[in-house]
Amino acid sequence: MSSLAARRRRGTDYWPGFVDALAALLMVLVFLLLVFTIGQFALADAISGRDKALASLNAELAELARALSMEREARSTALARVDELSASLASTREERDRLGIDLGQTREALDGAQAEAARLAADVAALNELKTQLEAEIAARLIALDETRTELAAKTELSERSLAQVELLNRQLAALREQLQTLTAALDAAKADIAAKDLKLDELGRELNLALAQRVQELARYRSEFFGRLREVLGARSDIEIVGDRFVLPSGLLFPSASDELSEEGLLQLSHLAETIKQIQREIPADLDWVLRIDGHTDRLPIRTARFPSNWELSSARAIAIVKYLVAQGIPAQRLSANGFGEHRPLDAGGSEAALARNRRIEIQLTNR
């Protein structure tokens, strides 16, 4: 009873419960602050990512605008260049016609000059031979004269006959010397004439080389136009390429594997090729001696069949098949050439399937004879 009375005297103690409640409330506040901080961080990161994306899009938009401006400028430049090239083409055609006439006259003059030079060379050779003979005869006469003089000096008296012989020999010697001088002057004149002819031949040769160089440039222009039209009709295929002055088509586009029989796709492509040749043929001048080379190439994998004992026969047969088809389409046979190189001129020295496929090809080259 005494202890119960003591507890009642102390009263009820609420402080520990109050402290626990405050601690729980503080933990809730800390958790809420942590959640708020994490949310703020995530929100800031999302806003930063959107700003970066917006900046990237703005940069791409500026780049596209710049590219569009450059494309418009390039298009304007290209149109102006086309107009210039059209005017230049008309001027070049007029110059080509004039050069064709000048080239014929230059060749005739060159042939005449060469004939004249040959005649002069023959005359010089004859003069040289005659000069040699005269010099030998003069030497012999001098020897005879010296011998005669020695004999006459040994004698105390000279007979009338000896004096006459000496005088005759002297006159002959003077005549021979005069003739030798005349021949020497003629030889010098002939040499000067030959030098002038050689100079004229050099000038004619330079003019001819210049005309031939212009013809080669003209053929190069038609070759470029031919390749451009051929690229248009065959389409923008990644396996068709231009290597130097040759148009390269994969063999698989025209022929089945290990065969020289043209496929349906090959016949279609070759019909486009024939039409392109006919169009460009009408523009090439008649006096420009051109030929279309068809070269067949294979990969390095060997082939041994009854029809094709080696890749030589296969590549040659494919080139000949293309030439025959073009002739049948109306292309003049004298303007075509078929060649087979087998595996001996690869474009890619590797052994992968891509390299082998690149080496199996048909090359078309527009060139002069």
Image (cartoon, rainbow, N blue to C red):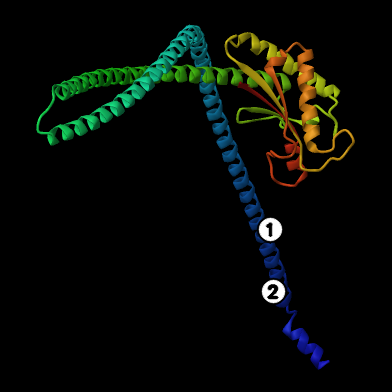
Of all residues, the one furthest to the right in this rendering is 306
Which of disc 2 and disc 1 is earlier in sequence? 2
Q: Mark 1–mark 2 contact, CB under 8 Å? A: no
Tell me where residue 114 sits by quadrant: top left
Please report the residue visible at 68 percent of the width from the left and 20 percent of the height from the top: 230
Q: Residue furthest bottom?
A: 2
Instruction: Name the residue nearer the viewer: 305 or 86.
Output: 305
Kindly report which numbered mark, 1 or 2, lies closer to the viewer in this rendering: 1
Type of amino acid at the residue the image marks with label 2: Val
Which SS class for mark 1?
helix
Residue at 66% x, 57% y is: 38
- Give the quadrant of residue 175: top left
The secondary element bearing badge 2 is classed as helix
Number of other residues with Cα within 10 Å of mark 2, as a class: few under 14, some 14 to 19, many 20 or more: few
**In the image, farthest residue toward the left:** 156
Left or right? Give the position of 222 relative to 264. Answer: left
Q: Which residue is mark 2?
A: 19
- Residue 38 lies left or right of residue 171; in this view the side is right
**Label 1 belongs to which residue?**
35
Looking at numbered disc 1 in the image, what kind of residue is underneath it?
Val
